[in-house]
Image: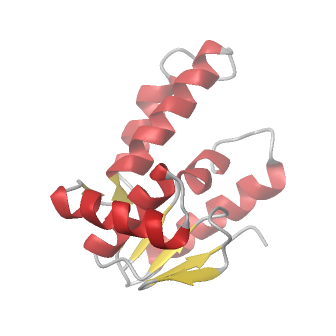
Amino acid sequence: MNAVDTNVLIYRLDQGEPAKRLQAIHLIDQLLADPTPTLLLWQVLGELLRCLQTWREQARIPHSGPTIYLQATLRLFPLKLPNQQVFDRALDLADRYSLSHWDSMLLGACIEAKVDTLFTEDMGAPRQIDSVQLVNPFI
């Protein structure tokens, strides 16, 4: 099972990062064609919405942009909601790997959802943390 981090979804839309935008679009297209399922994790969706709201406030996107893009993103992959075990795993991961709260939450959600590969440019990718392989699609 796969998942994408917020940065992949942001670059997919970001006109200010043309090279990364093309890479993100290509990755999403590949994941949609791949028989291995890809999940959209709840935290990623929340982080994406916050970024889009900031862009709207800066007049980088139209007023309706956050809603339109969020709805389009929800059509890409199934949404996975957190449970109590995500928080327990996050605390453990933060302690063992010195991760930020949000990174450990994302990894905890990946482990609970049985995600094998997380596409991200964060957390020192490429690397493996427990059962999750972190792959940086931008290098």
Q: Residue 92, how many percent across, how many down?
A: 36, 68
Decide if residue 41 is on the left or right side of residue 15: left
Decide if residue 35 is on the left or right side of residue 134: left
Quarter in which the C terminus is drawn: bottom right
Whether residue 94 is situated above or below residue 132 in the rendered picture = above
Residue 106: quarter of image? bottom left
- Residue drawn at (72%, 64%) of the image: 23
- Residue drawn at (72%, 53%) of the image: 21
Q: Residue 72, how many percent across, how many down?
A: 42, 43
Instruction: Count how many numbered circles sit on residues in the image.
Output: 0
Colour treatment of the image: secondary structure
Residue 41: quarter of image? bottom left
Decide if residue 75 is on the left or right side of residue 64: left
Q: From the viewer's side, name the closer residue of 80 and 36.
A: 80
Decide if residue 80 is on the left or right side of residue 59: left
In the displayed orientation, state which residue is furthest to the left.
84
Whether residue 133 is situated above or below residue 96 in the rendered picture = below
In the displayed orientation, state which residue is furthest to the front.
95
Q: Residue 82, how many percent across, how many down?
A: 23, 55
Quarter in which the N terminus is drawn: bottom left
Q: From the viewer's side, name the closer residue of 29 and 20.
A: 20
- Residue drawn at (59%, 18%) of the image: 56
Residue 52: quarter of image? top right
Q: Residue 16, how many percent across, how many down?
A: 80, 39
